[in-house]
Image: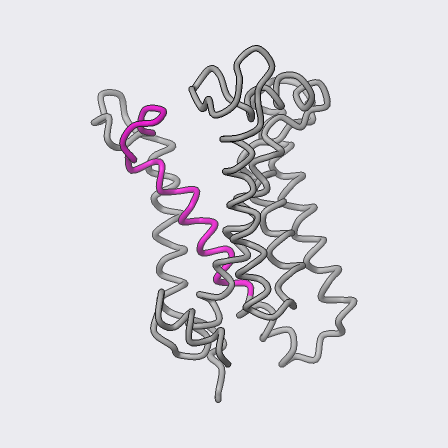
């Protein structure tokens, strides 16, 4: 089967997501609340869609990047180095922007740094068979959710996920913030989502219909 080098649908979706990102980050005063982030535990507003959509586009693009490298005869070790270079550059760009916002050099995790880690997980594990990638991604997501629901927080107890009391907040404040790694646990579900999205990229690349039928049909290939 001839594989497509690019996907017009994916390119359009990525462009829309970037445009939406710029839009919600530069809302004028008095903009309707539903254009911003929704309240904790409440409805999903427009700004809440940007990050997962970007992760979806990132994961779906990985099969196209990998197939392009194979067609051009890029050596395996060189392709792995290119992945690492993209991760490092995106991470450093995020550190630079975070430091500019703080007015001093800081080592911290923000959106771009989290995107870098999520891409790293998805790109490096892409060589696994689709079924294993899918099972691994689902396992990471389920384990992440189970930890939030079952692991007790000192002084709070298990199963609490309030804005000011939850396991992730406890880990960030107690252990990770002093190291500049606040938000590191979020790399687990975001990386798993990118890994899961690689299957959608394969469905697009092979001209299959999209989720769910095209994805699950690939599992049997």
Q: In x, y percent, where is residue 22? A: 38, 39
Q: Main secondary structure of the magenta part?
A: helix
- Color scheme of the displayed model: one colour
Residue plotted at (53% across, 61% down): 134
Give the extent of the magenta segment.
37-62
Q: In x, y percent, where is residue 176? A: 67, 24
Whether residue 49 appears in magenta in the rendering, the answer is yes
Whether residue 180 appears in magenta in the rendering, the answer is no
Q: In x, y percent, where is residue 75? A: 76, 74
Quarter of the image for residue 214 reads bottom left
Q: Is residue 175 left or right of residue 24?
A: right
Q: Please identify the residue farthest to the bottom as the structure is shown.
A: 1
Q: In the rendered image of this protein, does residue 73 appear above or below residue 181?
A: below
Q: In x, y percent, where is residue 210? A: 35, 68
Q: Is residue 220 left or right of residue 93?
A: left
Q: Please identify the residue farthest to the right as the structure is shown.
A: 77
**Disc count in the image?**
0
Q: Nearer the viewer, residue 47 or 188?
A: 188
Q: Nearer the viewer, residue 23 or 201?
A: 201
Residue plotted at (70% across, 80% down): 73
């Amino acid at each position: 089967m001839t594989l497509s080098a690019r996907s017009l649908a994916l390119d359009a979706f990525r462009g829309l997501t970037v445009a939406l990102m710029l839009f919600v980050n530069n809302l004028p005063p008095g903009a309707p609340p539903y254009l911003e982030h929704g309240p904790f535990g409440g409805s999903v507003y427009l700004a809440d869609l940007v990050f997962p959509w970007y992760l979806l586009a990132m994961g779906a693009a990985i099969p196209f990047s990998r197939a392009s490298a194979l067609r051009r005869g890029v050596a395996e070790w060189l392709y792995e180095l290119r992945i690492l270079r993209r991760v490092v550059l995106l991470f450093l760009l995020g550190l630079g922007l975070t430091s500019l916002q703080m007015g001093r050099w800081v080592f911290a995790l923000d959106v771009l740094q989290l995107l870098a880690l999520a891409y790293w997980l998805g790109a490096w594990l892409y060589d696994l068979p689709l079924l294993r990638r899918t099972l691994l991604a689902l396992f990471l997501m389920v384990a992440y959710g189970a930890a939030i629901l079952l692991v007790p927080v000192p002084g709070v107890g298990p199963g609490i996920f309030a804005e000011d009391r939850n396991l992730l907040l406890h880990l960030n404040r107690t252990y990770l913030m002093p190291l500049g790694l606040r938000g590191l646990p979020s790399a687990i579900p975001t990386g798993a989502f990118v890994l899961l999205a690689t299957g959608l990229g394969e469905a697009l690349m092979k001209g299959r219909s999209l989720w769910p039928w095209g994805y699950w049909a690939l599992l049997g290939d």
